[in-house]
Amino acid sequence: MRILVLLLLFLCETQSCATSRPNFVLLMADDLGIGDPGCYGNKTLRTPNIDRLAEGGVKLTQHLAASPLCTPSRAAFMTGMASQSKVGVFLFSASSGGLPTSEITFAKLLKNQGYSTALIGKWHLGTNCHNKTDFCHHPLSHGFDYFHGLPVTNLRDCKPGEGTVFTTGIRMLVSVPLQLIAIALLTLAVLKCLGLLPTPGLVFFCLLFLAAVILGLVVCFLYYFRPLNCFLMRNHEITQQPLSYDHLTQRLTEDAAEFIRRNAETPFLLVLSYLHVHTALFSSKDFAGKSKHGAYGDTAEEMDWSVGQILNVLDELRLANNTLIYFSSDQGAHVEEVTTRGEVHGGSNGIYKGGKANNWEGGIRVPGILRWPGVIPAGLEIDEPTSNMDIFPTVAKLAGSPLPEDRIIDGRDLMPLLQGKSQRSDHEFLFHYCNFYLNAVRWHPRNSTSIWKAFFFTPKFTPEGANGCFSTHVCFCHGDYITHHHPPLLFDISKDPRERNPLTMTTEPRFQEILEAMQQAADHHTKTLQEVPNQLSLGNIVWKPWLQMCCSSSGLSCQCDQEKQDRTVSH
């Protein structure tokens, strides 16, 4: 009898330990719209595995990205803190900016608690600071034991034949100098014909040489961009340069599954950060041409397959009941992603206005699904405001880690809301930034069902009547690209989620009172912001040749494929 009691006590202690220290699998899509998964209402895009995740857990219907752009959104997700920057994202692997070493990620906290940690897929938070081997911003410097993936991001320029994302920038930077040179040449030719100028041979030659240099720089930039910026790494080593899209999702998924198998007996954190569905779109032959939504649908359905593979591994190893799974997207769908051939390469934000790079609901309201069988109720739907910043304190508390006391954590522990112990979100106010600028404030008063959202400025959609900034490919946050609002544009999101009917003093009796309360909250919020080095300043985002990583020592050829060799050995 005594032995039986001791055995029961041991089992109870084991059960308690398992419940208090779960494994974590965090699945982050790139540019997936809230209108894309079937569980959020899509009837034609097949996402059975994401839907299975939602059926077995909680679906958040007002889950918000901390920023509508990749880099700041991912920084906030990793640290639980809102990010500010004047420029949106990193584009070069040889930039010196990135997630500062002073930041504390949930991976650092969990590693200190004995967790094995891995990030597989997209990082996009910088690599080096002063030289190409210091790896100050690298995932391994931020708490991850293992990294396999893309240090920057997936772009059209990474895939031959898919065009370039720099068309607008090149046009703005190059067209004016070339036009001035053309005007100067034409003027010289006219003056010569009129006999007003002697033969200007040297001047002609210099102007033509200058035009050739400008065009040559553009061609070199576009030619070398792919090998210098589109490559895969395993820990600190480049394994494939330039990257190959051949079975890329399968390779990364297989590596993620292998990480789970290696750590099945110990607590682990896996962040599987998908390259899907950011352009350039890609999919293997098993998915290419199979969806009802062209290349975008093929890509989304391949990502869903990957989610299913991870769920299957957890079931196979009997880890599902002791694993908290989170699925989301770093921001809304990129609605302006339309090719020169007219093919739509962006997703759906459902009923919501706008998309990636702006703070209309379509840019920041994203899928949010959490599953933990036996701990989180299955099939629950929550319409309270939550944020991807909330994952930081939620994961830290469940892992038994105290939160850092030397900084303000903007995220809130989700567990009381997910378990039904609380019916309201802990977020009374949320602040939406467009790069460096405070763009909008969201207020969910404690004594009200209303959710107020006030815009200080909004982007100018182009062409007129469009649902995005198609002329510039993304919306900007400054100058002639925005419209300032005095008083701020006010919506009640609980009644007008499409943001079609701004309120006025006539339609909302408390109009002035509401705006004053939101302005006071914004003023208080800005006073709490600490001055930190701007990681996305011009000096930190430009290409620096001494930071350029290359797997070959022979000039800028930068070609290697250790991934192919590894696959050959493993098979």
Image: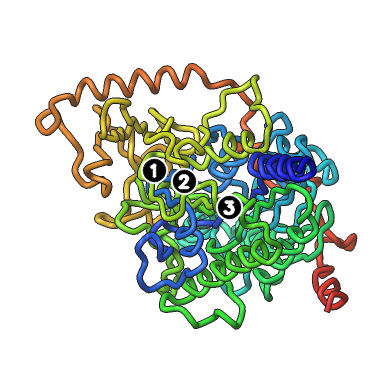
Q: Position of residue 518 (x, y in %)?
A: 32, 24
User: Taking 286 as reference, is 340 above or below it?
Assistant: above
Type of the residue with mark 2 = Pro
Question: Badge 2: how crowded within 10 Å, few (<14), some, or many (20+)?
Answer: many
User: Taking 197 as reference, is 441 above or below it?
Assistant: above
**Identity of the residue drawn at 29% across and 35% down:** 451
Residue 456 lies in what quarter of the image?
top left
**Identity of the residue drawn at 66% across and 40% down:** 16
The residue identified by callout 2 is 68
| Dot 2 and dot 3 residues touching (CB under 8 Å) | no
The residue identified by callout 3 is 325
Q: Position of residue 377 (x, y in %)?
A: 46, 49
Mark 2 or 3 closer to N-term?
Answer: 2
- Where the N terminus falls, by quadrant? top right
| Dot 2 and dot 1 residues touching (CB under 8 Å) | yes
Q: CA distance from mark 2 to mark 1?
A: 6 Å
